[in-house]
Amino acid sequence: MPQSARPVYKRILLKLSGEALLGDEDYGIDPEILKRLAEEVIEVSRTGVQIGLVVGGGNIFRGAGLAASGIDRATADHMGMLATVMNSLAMQDAIEKQGASCRVMSAIKINEVCEDYIRRRAIRHLEKGRIVIFAAGTGNPFFTTDSAAALRAIEINAELMIKATKVDGLYTADPMKDPNATRYERLSYDTAIERKLAVMDTTAFALCRDYRMPIRVYDLHRRGDLMRMMLGESVGTLVEA
């Protein structure tokens, strides 16, 4: 980063899907992907930006998928929450191996492996320059990790929620299926909800809308985009009021 460049954000919340950790694997975690993501997060953290992370669990268990196969939905969602704890611990390990300080805070009690989520303590960790990973979703069944990310972003007073995906923003249609799909530079929360843009669920969009939490959607595979966002560059799609 050039010496003259300064981040335009003080505190952000980054949402990573569990599938992002798969890489070329069919199940579980690709260590190389984990290492690269940790490097990018640390690079941003070292500029002074305070970073909270929410990691999904879809590479191990997805509550909705398990429910569709016949498991009780509440039980399936609790299994999904435990999967996010596993991913969060893996991400913590990757971050700490590279010399940064990191804490995992869980919405469900699992004290032997990580801290309980306490809002004021989480903010204190961030203020001390630690990367904080929020695990176990909201701690309640029937809510996605996208909703958990929106909730945590609001609770910690983040200035921006970032959703990392497989494509470089929100499109008028699925760009993988429709070659004529065009990318939105920016759009409103209501438009995203009305057009049923599937990058996040309606509850997450509505939470961000009600508390005016801007969302930026970007392609996590494009290395350097996270830092470019921090420097104020227009990356991906911005969803705002």
Image (cartoon, helix red, strand yellow):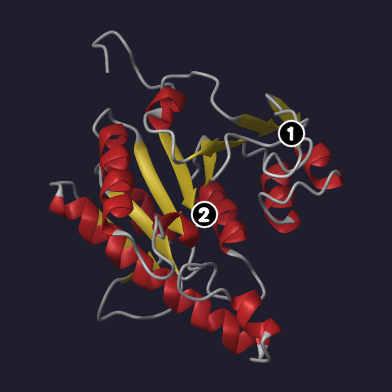
Q: Mark 1 points at which residue?
A: 179
The residue at 64%/91% (across/down) is 71
The residue at 48%/68% (across/down) is 57
The residue at 72%/57% (across/down) is 203
Q: Which sits in the foreground, 206 or 229?
A: 229
- Say whether residue 33 is left or right of residue 8: left
In the structure shown, which secondary structural element does the residue marked by tag 1 occupy?
A: loop
Look at the picture and state if 133 lies above or below 41. below
Q: Name the residue under label 2.
A: 152
Mark 1 crowdedness (10 Å alpha carbons): few <14, some 14-19, many ≥20: few
Picture coordinates of residue 81, whole percent (x, y): 49, 75
Picture coordinates of residue 220, whole percent (x, y): 46, 41
Viewer can see residue 15: yes
The tag on residue 220 is none
Q: Quadrant of the C terminus?
A: top right
Picture coordinates of residue 228, whole percent (x, y): 42, 23
- Of labels 2 and 1, earlier in sequence is 2
Mark 2 or 1, which is nearer the eye? 1
Picture coordinates of residue 105, whole percent (x, y): 36, 65
Q: Which residue lies furthest to the top in this view?
A: 4
In the structure shown, which secondary structural element does the residue marked by tag 2 occupy?
A: helix
Look at the picture and state if 1 lies above or below 146. above
State yes or no: discs 2 and 1 in contact (Cβ < 8 Å). no
Mark 2 crowdedness (10 Å alpha carbons): few <14, some 14-19, many ≥20: many
Viewer can see residue 10: no
Three-letter code for the amino acid on which mark 2 is drawn: Arg
- Say whether residue 95 is left or right of residue 163: left
Three-letter code for the amino acid on which mark 1 is drawn: Pro
Q: In which quarter of the image is the N terminus?
A: top left
Which of the 4 image quarters holds residue 31?
A: bottom left
> Could you tell me how far apart the alpha carbons at marks 2 and 1 are, in whole angstroms?
36 Å
Which of the 4 image quarters holds residue 64?
A: bottom right
